Each structure stands twice: as C-alpha cells, then as structure tokens.
Image: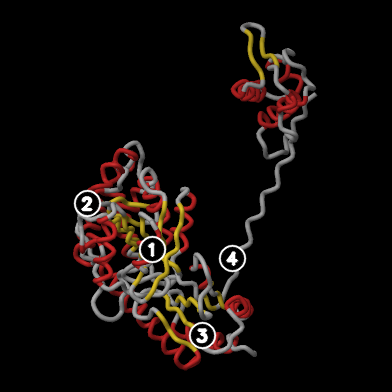
Amino acid sequence: MFILDQNDQEPLYKQLYKQIRAHVLSGKIPAHSKLPSVRDLAAELSTSRNTVDGAYQELYAEGYIYSKERSGYFVSALDQNAAPLSLNNEPRKPSRAPKPSPNFTYDFHPARLDPASFPVAQWRTCFLECLRESSREFSQYGDPQGDWGLRSNIQQYLERSRGVICEPDQIVICAGLQHSLDFVAHLLKENHSTVAVENPGYRLPRAVFQNNSFTIVPVSVGSGGIDLEALRASESTIAYVTPSHQLPMGHVMPVANRLNLIDWAESGGNLIIEDDYDSELRYHGKPIPSLQGLRPDGNIIYTGTFSKILSPALRLSYMVLPRSLLVRFQALYHDYFSTVSLLEQKTMAKFMELGYWERHVRRMRISYQKKHDAMLKAIKHYFGTRAIVVGQGAGLHVVMQLQDENPGETEIICRAAEHGINLFPFSATCAVGAPAATSLLLGFGGLSAAEIEQGIEILSRISSKMR
C-alpha cells in the first residue's frame, strides 16, 4: 500500500507520513480503521521500526490518528470536505522572486542617499563593542520606549543642535516615521478625529492617519509655511507640519508664524506634530531651531529620524512626547515591547557616545552641499530662464518649476524613464488639486556631481515641448 524511495532525499519516515496522511484525508483509509503495528508495517516495507514509529508519532501529534492502550493506532474521524484539495507527494516548485526594480542610470528620487556614505568601519566597531558589553541584556525584552542610553544621547543631541527641551523619559524610539505616527494616531483618536496636513506635503502622514480612520484636511502651504487662516477655518484639531524645511517646497516657517501656530494649538486644546526630518542638512546660515524649543511644555509632538543622514534601512527614528501625552502613552503601551532591535539601539547609542554621529553629520553636510551646489549649477547652465528653483539651501532635494511650454509632468517622467532617469512625481505630494506649473522634484543624494550634470542635461532636452 505504501512505497518508500531509498533514492529520494526526503527522509523515509517523512515519505511514509505523507502517504498515510493523504490516504486518511482522501478517505481511502476509513475513520477508526486500525493501522498495522509498527513491527508489521516495518517488515512489510523492509524498513526499520524507527521509520514507521517516526511517521506514526508525527501523525499522532497532528491528530490524524489516535491510540488505544494495548491495541495500537487508529484513524481519526475527519471531515474530508474540509481537507486540503491537494496533498500529493510531489515537491512544490519554489516561487519566483519578484522582478527587481528598474535600474536607472540617474535616480533623482528625493529619498536616495549616497551609496558610499554609510560609516561601515565605525558602525562595526560600535556593534562589536555592544555585543561584548551588553550580551546579557540580549536575553531580555526591551523597554517599550526604547533603550535608555540611546534616549539619553538623543536628548543631549537635540538640546545642543535643535534647541529641543525635553528629558529622556519623554523620548520614544520608533522604527521610522510611519511607526511614530501610528503610535500618535492611537494616542489621539479618543479625543481627535481630524488632521490638517500640508498641501503639497509628505503623503505618508496622510496614509497613516487615513488608515486609522481620521479625516484628512489638506491646507495650502506658502513661503511662510502652512496657511494659518485656512488651518483655523478647517476645524482640524491636529496639524502635521514640517516647519524647518517644508516637504517638498523647502520653505522655512518664520518665527512669527511659529508662535501663531503654537497659540492655535494652546488656545483650542489642539495639537501640533512637528516633523524635523532633515534638520541636519542646512547648507547656508545657522540651523533653524525647532518649533518645540519655543514652547517645550506646549502641545507639540516632535519627530526626528536617522534615515536622512545615516541609513533608512536601519529603521531608527524617535519622537518627543509632551508630558500631557506621556501618561496616556504609558497606560496604552505598558504591556508592549520595543519593536526596534535592542542591538541596533545600543549600537546607535555607542555611535553617538564616541562622537561618530556628529562627525558623520558634518561629513555628510559637506558632501551633500557639494551635490546641492552641483545641482543648482547644472540647472542654471542647462535650463537658464526656462526654470525656477524652489527650496534650495537645505535637504536632499530641490523643486524645479518649468516656466516655458512643456509636455507636462506625466510625459516628462515617461520620457525620462526611456533615458534611464527616475523621477518621483511632484503631483504625488498634492493631496488635492494640481500644481499651477509643471514642477519636477529632484533629489541629488544618491548621485555624483558628474551624474547630476549628465541627468540635468538630458532633462533639459526632453522637457521641451518638442524634442
């Protein structure tokens, strides 16, 4: 009744297990039928008793058969209609891997970093030191808010570089902005239902809050940041803003507008989410102080990340909660554990303690400033008066608004792809409406100066009305 193949790589007991299981599920062996004894079946198949016993034990553990004392094994009563349609012995073919992403010669995506920028040697040093120093801690779950050492280092760094005033117990380590905002959405949904977002603006916050059943209200953005009058008229009780380098337009919110925004929050019991996503990358003048630093005890949630300078693959970010929300956070999440690897948290803490982080920030600021300047130079050379650049002076991207007749964003992106150029659509940042002029979102972080010039030269040719 059963056939074992000695030449098959699959163990003999597994072969027998699968064949008996298939017979049971198909009804070929009726319910409550007695199976041959281990000794008899082993003799019939010319195999060892261990092979038959191994198959029986696995079938018994999974409930396909049951035993009676001194009587042997019997087939369990199963609903054949609920059984899988196919349980044959043929090995399943491995699934094909998804097709790789297109390989572009010039990738102007605004989130790309320099491929050679990650500080491998220093990170490896910190990683190995943490393994030696903290190995006992890796047998335990981490604090829901993250490693205390990392939170302490972040607190000191933020106070020194961004003017953020907080204590380590207000900081929560997260796995990227989407993780931070998901926390925030759960914290606020009891008393809030509407979120104002910048338009144009980062689309991830819109998605996170929509997925948490919030109403999204797009509010227009100008050179002074989010339109405060439109915000007041929106009846939103939460405002998500990028005041130090508006994404994507690059505007800096003036201090008068910042104070008015804070007053909006405090006068109506409203709340501000300040996303300080690329605060380290300012190329001219002093860094813009944080909104949170103007009112440390205000209704402001401050979020930051290591993705724009160090690596987006590490999934390391943080948020600073006002004390008014800290109690609720601890009540909601006291049974949770941190989802960020403790080893990577401790490595980051060591990286900061040894001064590697601030050294790396300085090096990246110099490197990206050269690329930023190469981008502006190339646009001026190849586009001249045909384009205006918006948002220069900080970050990893600029916005180029075309002034002459052109085929439009969709056609330009298609033409660019044909020439090996990747462009992220500026229109994707618009929650409603369309840009008044054709705008191209040009990231420069992942390109060399030579590649930037070559890519811009191609764009200047393909973005004309006639080519």
Q: Is residue 424 visible?
A: no
Q: Which residue is mark 3?
A: 402
Q: Residue at x 49, y 68 (%)?
A: 430
Tell me the element at label 3. Answer: strand
Residue at the spot of label 2: 168
Instruction: Looking at the image, tell me whether mark 2 or mark 4 is earlier in sequence order.
Output: 4
| Residue located at (36% from left, 76% from top) | 223
Q: In the image, 190: left or right of 324?
A: right
The CA span between labels 4 and 3 is: 29 Å
Residue 77, given in percent of the width and then of the height, sits at 70, 17
The CA distance from mark 2 to mark 4 is 40 Å
Colour mapping: secondary structure
Measure the alpha-carbon separation of dots 2 and 1: 21 Å
Which residue position is annotated with label 4?
A: 101
Secondary element under disc 1, as helix, strand or loop, is loop
Residue 371 vs residue 298: left or right?
right
Q: Earlier in the sequence, mark 2 or mark 3?
A: 2
